[in-house]
Image (tube, coloured by chain):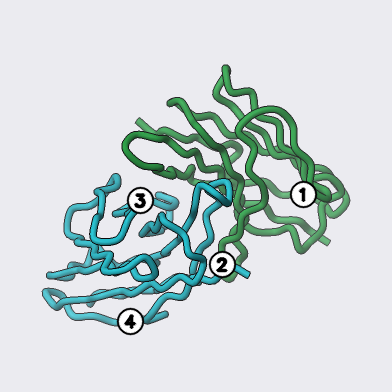
Chain colours: A green, B cyan
Amino acid sequence: GQQVQQSPASLVLQEGENAELQCNFSSTATQLQWFYQSPGGSLVSLLSNPSGTKHTGRLTSTTVTKERRSSLHISSSQTTDSGTYLCAIERRTNAYKVIFGKGTHLHVLP
Amino acid sequence: EAAVTQSPRSKVAVTGGKVTLSCHQTNNHDYMYWYRQDTGHGLRLIHYSYVADSTEKGDIPDGYKASRPSQENFSLILELASLSQTAVYFCASSDVDSGNTLYFGEGSRLIVV
């Protein structure tokens, strides 16, 4: 089965509204990362948050490791936030293996 | 600034032909990864490597080979390209010292006809 599940699959907001993205994972993760993929396709890391709460700019991530879930909160959304948000977990076997969810497609309307 | 560069950025290949996608990183990272991205599937791990001259299978390795001749370079090889391998391919690097944050290349769009 899918190891990383994200919800919702897509989200449409009016500029200024807040967004809440969810990530659930089925196996033990040594690390959890959130990524942003632009409409043009480029991928950048937003933040790493294996447990607890982390803030950067308008982004807040909360990860509850025991419950195998993480959320990404985007406050005061802007049209430039439109794109795809990907959650990824890192599993360590003999090496670090990073597995992605399918993403949440966010569209912020002006 | 971390840098991962991929080549070619775009390629049209003939079914049954050989395709090599190259990735070069200047981050001095130990780990390198190849992912493919398709609509509806997200990013799926093909092969990865944590040291030069060694590669590991990811979740969808069939039809792909990988080569890590040096710490900086990681190639993905399609010996017999098939239509189902049309996708966008991303290379990434990471390192324990940088918190295992993945740094991605810009992607290589492969179309097999």
Q: Are marks 2 and 4 on the same chain?
A: no
Residue at 26% from the left image edge and 69% from the top image edge: B69
Q: Quick check: B42 above or below A80?
A: above
- Tally the numbered discs: 4
Residue position marked by numbered label 3 in the rendering: B45
Rendered location of residue A30, percent (x, y)? 50, 32
Mark toward the viewer: 3 or 4: 3
Residue in the picture at 29% in, 54% down? B47
Q: Residue at x 58, y 51 (%)?
A: B98
Is label 2 on the same chain as label 3? no
Point 64% across, 29% down: residue: A51
Which amino acid, mark 4?
Lys
Describe the element under mark 1 as helix, strand or loop.
strand
What element does badge 2 sit on?
loop
Residue behind mark 1: A13
Q: Amino acid at mark 1?
A: Leu
Q: Earlier in the sequence, mark 1 or mark 2?
A: 1
Q: Amino acid at mark 2?
A: Ser
Q: CA distance from mark 1 to mark 4?
A: 36 Å
On what subunit does the disc labeled 3 rest?
B
Q: Give whichever of discs 3 and 4 has the lower sequence position.
A: 4
- In the structure shown, which secondary structural element does the residue marked by tag 4 occupy? strand
Q: Which residue is mark 4?
A: B11
Quarter of the image with the N terminus of chain A is top left
Residue corresponding to mark 2: A42
Please state which of residues B76 and B80 is positioned toward the viewer in this rendering. B76
How far across and down, in percent of the image, does residue A68 sit? 55, 24
Question: Mark 3 to mark 4: distance in Å?
Answer: 20 Å
Furthest-top residue in this view: A66
Establish whether labels 1 and 4 are both on one chain: no
Q: Is residue B46 left or right of residue B81?
A: right
